[in-house]
Image (cartoon, rainbow, N blue to C red):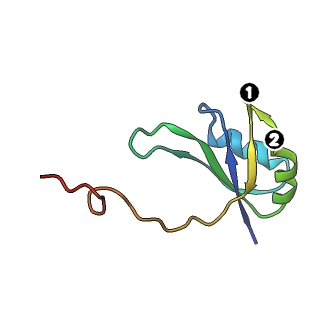
Amino acid sequence: MSKKLYVGNLPFDANADELREMFTAYGRVLSATLVTDRETGQPRGFGFVEMNDGADEAIQALHSAQFGGRTLTVNEAKPREDRPRVGASGGQFRGR
């Protein structure tokens, strides 16, 4: 069964290929994605890596490692909780 890992504090100029390459040393990487801001398209400084094997070893080796001058945070991703959306259809603004 695969594990999805959260990778935080990434440099803003990092790319998915670099992320994949970093984790390949610990096992087969199924996917590597960087999260971007929906509106601006700019990187948000974190991403996710999905691996079949070696996820625990990757966490041990890469958590607190230096990458692009930044100290990485690597841990098992937690499921995203449903949260209310604030915006055009569900916001609190009641203008006149």
The amino acid type found where label 2 is placed reads Ser
Q: Is residue 58 left or right of residue 18?
A: right
Relative to 96, 12 lies left or right: right
**Label 2 or label 1, whichever comes before in sequence order:** 2
Quadrant housing residue 5: bottom right
All told, the count of numbered labels is 2
Q: Is residue 75 left or right of residue 26?
A: left
Query: What is the quadrant of the N terminus in the image?
Result: bottom right
Residue 64: which numbered mark, if any? 2
Write the residue at 55% across / 67% down. Answer: 81
In the rendering, at what x and y percent does residue 27 appear? 83, 55
Expressed as whole percent of the image width and height from the top left, the position of residue 54 reads 85, 58
> Where residue 31 sits: x, y (%)?
66, 55
Residue 52 image-quadrant placement: bottom right
Task: Note whether 11 is above or below 87 in the view shown.
Answer: above
Which residue carries the number 1 mark? 69
